[in-house]
Amino acid sequence: MPDTSEMTDEELDLWSDINNPNNEADMDDWADAHNPNNDSYLGD
């Protein structure tokens, strides 16, 4: 399991969604959140 101590609040929210079997988030959403060319990008 990745180290979550360095994650931002937004990343932690997404991470918990991905790991929640009742949620439809998946690693594609994680990749989108970390891709600066994507509308879902979490960066500044």
Image (cartoon, grey):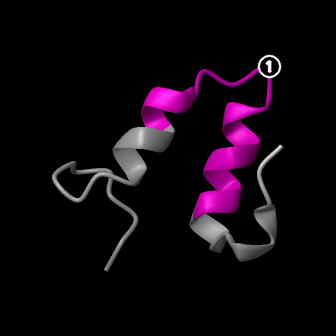
Out of 3 and 19, give the one closest to the viewer. Answer: 3
> Which residue shows up at 68% across the image and 47% down it?
15
Q: Position of residue 24 (x, y in %)?
A: 60, 21
Out of 23 and 32, give the one closest to the viewer. Answer: 32
In magenta, the rendered stretch is 11-29
Q: Indicate the quadrant containing the N terminus: top left, top right, bottom left or bottom right.
A: top right
Q: Position of residue 36 (x, y in %)?
A: 23, 59
Q: Quadrant of residue 43?
A: bottom left
Q: Position of residue 11 (x, y in %)?
A: 60, 60
* Residue farthest along the front direction in this orientation: 2
**Mark 1: secondary structure:** loop
8 left or right of 29 in image = right
Q: Indicate the quadrant containing the C terminus: top left, top right, bottom left or bottom right.
A: bottom left
Q: Is residue 22 above or below residue 44?
A: above
Q: Is residue 32 above or below residue 6?
A: above
Mark 1 is on which residue type? Pro
Q: How many numbered discs, if any? A: 1
User: Label 1 belongs to which residue?
Assistant: 21
Q: Is residue 40 above or below residue 42?
A: above
> Which residue shows up at 58% across the image and 65% down it?
10
> Which residue shows up at 21% across the image and 48% down it?
38
10 left or right of 28 in image = right
* Residue farthest along the left direction in this orientation: 37
Out of 1 and 22, give the one closest to the viewer. Answer: 1
